[in-house]
Amino acid sequence: MSDVQSFRSDALRVLTDEIGVYALCDLDGVPIYVGQSVDGIRTRARRHLTSARSDVIANRQVDVWEIAYVWAWPVREASEIIRLEAYLFNEFDVAVRLMNGKAMPPPEQPVNVPEKQVVQVIEEEERINRQDPALRLPRQIMQYNLLVDYILNVKDAGISNALWMLISSGLSGITRYFYRPPKKGHFLFRTSSCTMISPVSVTP
């Protein structure tokens, strides 16, 4: 077992194993996937982070290398989970497109949000190292290519709205990580899923 895997395994031991809702967060501490578990949050998170029986990982929706934190909201009753998951999904998806691959309608009734538990699953020095664009950008591009390849060659239903959401979310993630304000003399323009910069001549 590598040092990274060993640290992650030890960190997950303190994560609650009660039922509830959880979020997988990236190297910047931003949620990129929201899920629920009726078997125990620690059990479900461990499956994701070890790629064991995890559709989210197998489907290329989330790259384990990018996950630095797990947030957890344990609940007492299973009946609370669906509304809490929908509430948190809509809270986070507004700021950053989540990699869930499907939208969730916001709950119609107020939701009681439990106290959040935060567990860091990689060492701080390693988290900072992985934020280096020289490491992170190639990894993100590779993951995006794997996602597109999976959609085109494995999925049988064609490019559905849910799959388009995944493609858009993956591309917007790359944009979010590596976008820099344009230099003077460049125009900035946006597409539906990303920001691009085009050089132009500037007349004094």
Image (tube, rainbow, N blue to C red):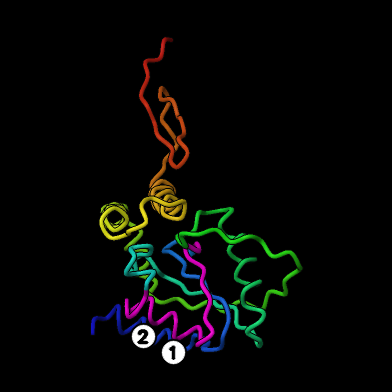
Residue at point 41%, 77% (across, down): 121
Q: In the depicted view, which residue is nearer to us: 120 or 173?
A: 173
Q: In the depicted view, which residue is nearer to us: 14 or 114?
A: 114
Q: Is residue 39 magenta?
A: yes
Q: What residue sits right under mark 2 in the picture?
A: 9
How many marks the image carries: the answer is 2
From where the camera sits, is residue 116 visible?
A: yes
Q: Amino acid at mark 1?
A: Arg
Q: Is residue 34 above or below residue 135?
A: below
Q: In the image as oriented, which residue stretches furthest toward the front?
A: 157
Residue 197: quadrant of the picture: top left
Where does the image place residue 2, in percent across and percent down from the top left? 24, 81
Q: Is residue 200 above or below residue 72?
A: above
Q: Is residue 41 magenta?
A: yes
Circle 2 SS class:
helix
Q: Is residue 181 above or below residue 26?
A: above
Q: Is residue 103 above or below residue 44?
A: above
User: How many residues crowd mark 2 within 10 Å: few (<14), some (14–19), many (20+)?
Assistant: some
- The magenta segment is 30-54
Residue 90: quadrant of the picture: bottom right
Q: In the image as oriented, which residue stretches furthest toward the right?
A: 110
Where does the image place residue 164, in percent across and percent down from the top left? 42, 50
Residue at point 45%, 42% (across, down): 193
Q: Quadrant of the C terminus?
A: top left
Q: What residue sits right under mark 1 in the picture?
A: 13
Circle 1 SS class:
loop
